[in-house]
Amino acid sequence: MDGFLLNLSILKWPIGKFVTNGLSVCWQTEHPVCSAINECGRLTSIFYLLAKINSDLCHVLNIAQIAKYPQVQIRVALKDFLDKKVEQYNRPSFIKDDPISIPHLFKKKEAIEIAGFFAATFAWGNRTTIIKKSKELMSLMDMSPYEFCLNHDHNELKRLLQFKHRTFNATDLLYFIEFFRWHYSHYDTLEAAFTRWMKKDDLTTKNALTGFHHYFFSLENIPERTRKHIATPERNSSCKRLNMFLRWMVRKDKNGVDFGIWKNILPAQLVCPLDVHVVRVAKRLGILKRKPPDWKAALELTSFLRTLDENDPVKYDFALFGSGIMPG
């Protein structure tokens, strides 16, 4: 599926017709106002097409509104549009202003995992603040998060007691560090904390996320307040931050943004992170109908993205997020 049938009679365009062949769409008419559209060639966005005719209309209409009108229909090349947006944002220049810049500070696999997990955990709110607080924590760990988690002493932990990011405080931080100390004393990668709960025929990472939640809170003396920082599909959470972390660890391509250091989870199994910008753009495009941004909504969006690329559906996170937060 690479597009939708959308109704555009609300535009009240002059007499003419749409001519479509594959992904190319043109409006054929003798009317001078519409002459520019005949040169548009490959259509990349419904909003681009509308702008050719009436830029003001772009600000008041979205696809869902347009689709109410039944007379003129056009097949919009949504896949083409999203693929171009992936190409635009999935590049090294994306890294520096995104929380993924934190694990990119490191080369060692375990350090990438730990730094990435903290950065993803902190990823709600302003990205500048997220990056600042993540760098602060890495500095408190002497820029060696793996060694710190395994070999810290009491005095080194004391320097963390004033750390806070929004509702994440020192109590939560100390538990996270204790979990990492315990886990890495038994496994050489954080991947095992997710994959040990998966089945061979799992379509998504639901079992991995559910199992990880129970595993993460399997130590003694768990602070109850810390539970809110690790989501689970069992509570119908979208698990946005964990899904983002998994994207970082699992996806691999030639562009060097995502790491692709985990090999036992397939990119096809990933679930799209439901960032607020992703949700807004997906709803404007008409590819997400469910209102609450929960686990069911994450599956709904991912199911559609899988029709665009069944092997790597979550690459479109770049397109949806980038279109929502960045100009151009």
Image: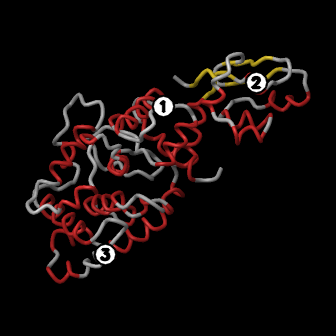
x 64%, y 24%: residue: 23
User: Which-is-in-front pick, marks 2 and 1?
Assistant: 1
The crowd level at tag 1 (other Cα within 10 Å; few <14, some 14-19, many 20+) is some
User: Which-is-in-front pick, marks 2 and 3?
Assistant: 3
The crowd level at tag 3 (other Cα within 10 Å; few <14, some 14-19, many 20+) is some
Residue 233 position by quadrant? top left
Q: Secondary structure at mark 1?
A: loop
Q: Secondary structure at mark 2?
A: strand
Mark 1: amino acid: Lys
Q: Look at mark 2 in the image and give the residue it sits on.
A: 26
Mark 3: amino acid: Phe
x 11%, y 54%: residue: 218
Whether residue 82 sits left or right of residue 256 in the image: it is right
The alpha-carbon separation of the residues under discs 2 and 3 comes to 57 Å
The alpha-carbon separation of the residues under discs 2 and 1 comes to 29 Å
Mark 2: amino acid: Cys
Q: Look at mark 1 in the image and give the residue it sits on.
A: 289
Whether residue 286 sits left or right of residue 224 in the image: it is right
User: Which-is-in-front pick, marks 1 and 3?
Assistant: 1
x 32%, y 63%: residue: 115
Residue 309 position by quadrant? top left
Q: Closer to the N terminus: mark 1 or mark 3?
A: 3
Whether residue 115 sits left or right of residue 194 in the image: it is right
